[in-house]
Amino acid sequence: MKQLILSINYLKFFKLTIGAIAAFAIAQLIGLSYAPAAGIITLLTITDTRRETLRITLKRLIIFALMTMLSILTFPITGYNILGFSLIIIPYLLVCLLLNMNEAIAMIAVLCTHFISSGSCSPSMIINEFLLLLIGAGIGIVLNWFMPSNINKIRARQKEIDKRMLHILHRMSIYLLREDKSDYTGSCFQETEALLKDLQWEAMQYIGNHFHTSHDYFLRYMKMRTMQCEILKRIYHDIMRIHWIPQQAAPLSHYFEDISREFSEVNDVVQLLEKSEQLFEHYRQESLPQTRTEFENRALLYHMLFDVQMMIQLKYDFASGLSDLEKQRYW
């Protein structure tokens, strides 16, 4: 129970409470009919991010215009009854679903029922409904603009992910040279993947509260680390398949250790890519394997080197794709 209470987003709770009451009060103060609807609109407007709030509000304005036009064309002819409502709701729902405006359906339909209840589609009634929407959505947008930055959470998760991946690489450098791998498990990958999913959620929240495209840096960073983690899992399985350690494993082990020492957010990894090419050339100069066992294990080493180079290339591509502004802001 205590954990459930602590999990509540109290900032959003206070926004919803204050917003609904304020919208109701303002609508009532200026003499609007159906004033409580303004409070309900505020409740449905406040979301987890600024961008989502604006997106939903824009959809509701578009659908409100459609619903008002249909009401003006239909109700005076059919009367304010179930027939008129049916003739409006069918095309209204079709447009909402075709344009993926599901968030607007319920609230705007309620405003439509106000026309039926009042028996009027007069200009004053249309203005009344528009003001209800404007007050409710406007207060929701204003309150949702006060959104605490989650940059510290993102940075903390980044550091933890990098730390764990560094640890994975360090362990690889050790167990690559060990025949006994009975205590070498892949549990670290599950923990890292959980952190990556958490970082993805935080990154999406960060993007949703900013409007400049450069703010997707953390999402791109998360995707890059996720792909690297998948490659490391493949390397782990290859290490587990090696039971006879050829002498050629030592240089690759040292390379894993080098990567772990230089595994950081701000490294452009140019030198690490050069080292991988040098290691490939070193292996090309080696004499050919003499036995099937040697051949199979050296083939695994070559495959691991290919994978780790791919992992480094991902970071190189990420760093190369950054603008000067992004490097200045995030590095």
Image (cartoon, grey):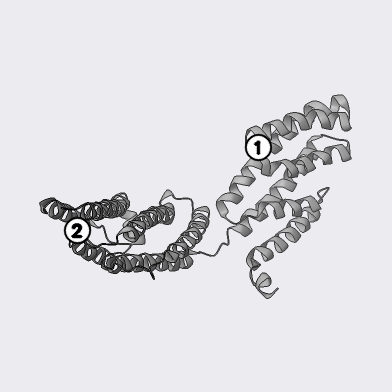
**Residue furthest out toward the front:** 291
Picture coordinates of residue 176 (x, y %)? 28, 64
Q: Residue at x 29, y 52 (%)?
A: 307
Residue in view at x 83 percent, y 38 percent = 115
Q: Is residue 307 above or below residue 91?
A: below
Q: Position of residue 266 (x, y in %)?
A: 30, 62
Query: In the visual, does 19 lie left or right of 247?
Result: right
Q: Is residue 140 visible?
A: yes
Residue 177 place in picture, x, y as percent: 25, 67
Check disc 2 and give the amino acid type.
Gln
Q: Could you tell which of marks 1 and 2 lies nearer the N-terminus? A: 1
Query: Which residue position is annotated with label 1?
Result: 62
Query: Is disc 1 surrounded by few (<14), some (14 to 19) or many (20+) residues within 10 Å?
Result: few
Image quadrant for the C terminus?
bottom left
The amino acid sitting under disc 1 is: Ile
Residue placed under numbered mark 2 in the picture: 271
Specify the quadrant that holds the N terminus.
bottom right
Q: Position of residue 120 (x, y in %)?
A: 85, 35
Label 1's element? Answer: helix
Question: In front here: 218 or 272?
Answer: 272
Residue at position x 68%, y 71% in the image: 5
| Left or right, residue 69 beside residue 46 | right
SS type, badge 2: helix
Q: CA distance from mark 1 to mark 2?
A: 54 Å
